[in-house]
Amino acid sequence: MLELDAGLDFNPENDADFFTMLPERPAVCLIEPREETAQPHLIRTANLRRRLQRLLGPFDSTSKRLNLRDFAHQVRYCVTNSAFEQSLTYYQLARRYFPKRYKDLMRLRPSPMLKVNLKNAYPRCYATRHISVNELGTPTGGIYYGPFPSRKAAQTYADSVLDFFKVRRCQIKIRRDPAFPGCIYSEMKMCLAPCFAGCTKQEYDMEVGRLVQFLETGGGSLRANYEQERERASEDLDFEHAAAVHKKLEKLDDALRAGPEIARRVQDLNAVILQRMADEQTIGLFGVCGGRLAEPFALRFGDTSQPRSAEETVRDYLESVMNAAPRAGTPRQLATELGEHLRLVARWFYSNPREGEIFFREKDWPYRRILRACARLLAPPEEEAGETKQ
């Protein structure tokens, strides 16, 4: 939990000294009221001193700007050094102090995902913002793939992927009626047409299984099948078929390149986000396990009192993230938290420009790449470095 680690009492009579003591830095700040029955006021800002001068400065009757000079008793704040750190700090504090309206404060909606609803007898792949989880917080009822920056982006990616599978795209209730005329996708041979019994249940389940495997492997399963098919065709001197398969591979690669790097099955969304912190020579490690944000860790470089190397420290933190006990709560609470954490990560990932770096866990963590990224983030900006050389 990121805490408000600094604070000052506010006295309107000595406001000049009060403002001088505030840092001109980005921060999250809680303004506590004089009256016990009043609720505190939570803000995030790019310049704490300037923002509080506006909020706590002398009242101007000609201005409609919010003034809390007579409201404030004390301010507590936490200096932040990046947009992601500030967003996470604000989220955690808003949940603590305003549990009923923190979503409105942050304009927080779950990120769009792709879902293959395996509870349906004839599943389809579609965009959704709702994730169902069990008592352990594990997604249930289907495969969830994402997050995406918008519902439109999720649906666009789904359309490009479904071109390689004959899974239905319609939303009708499947009755397997031979008299049913079918839809345009069945006419174009882009669907196995279970609506008019164009396939058996087993055949449709096999096609859905191929789609699920595709999403679980990030397209690797289908690409491997195409490569094997192309190789067999070449060995059989069937060059026409090999060329056709090669075109499918090119189309598949185009579809995969259009998909964001972060999009993957939710259970497999294991990553670490690196952010430069306010303290000197310090990098914040923000672990992500199964789409959920773990407690961050401050990695301090140049601290000779630490007996372990930086790589050992990073390794221990990431192992603790992956081996953490399941979170407590009802399935509804856990689903809400998962959706919110995915949204926070997605907001940062799709932001432009994006501060910091992210590394995903595939078979293992790329420890050396993580440490090299830490060095890059701690390096002085080029302009400052140039001035130092001069």
Image (cartoon, rainbow, N blue to C red):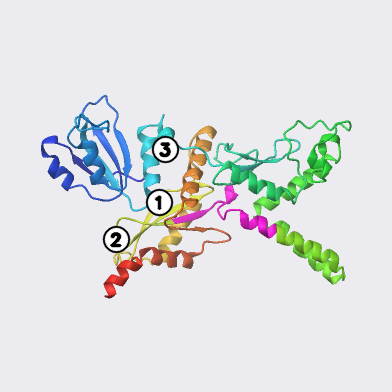
Q: Quadrant of residue 74?
A: top left
Horizontal side of 166 relative to 296 (left or right) equals right
Q: CA distance from mark 3 to mark 1?
A: 20 Å
As drawn, the label of residue 280 is 2
Task: Name the residue tied to disc 1.
Answer: 296
Q: Which circle, 3 or 1, is nearer the viewer?
A: 3
Q: CA distance from mark 1 to mark 2?
A: 17 Å
Q: Quadrant of the C terminus?
A: bottom left
Asked if residue 58 is positioned above or below residue 208 in the image, the reply reads above
Q: CA distance from mark 3 to mark 2?
A: 29 Å
Q: Position of residue 345 (x, y in %)?
A: 48, 48
**Identity, as a three-letter code, of the amino acid under mark 2:** Glu
Asked if residue 340 is positioned above or below residue 60 in the image, the reply reads below
Disc 1 is placed on an element classified as loop
Disc 2 is placed on an element classified as loop
Residue sitting at x 56%, y 43%: 150
Q: Position of residue 7 (x, y in %)?
A: 22, 43
**Identity, as a three-letter code, of the amino acid under mark 1:** Pro
Q: Residue furthest left?
A: 13
Q: Quadrant of the N terminus?
A: top left
Q: Is residue 343 magenta?
A: no
Task: Name the residue tied to disc 3.
Answer: 106
Q: Earlier in the sequence, mark 3 or mark 1?
A: 3
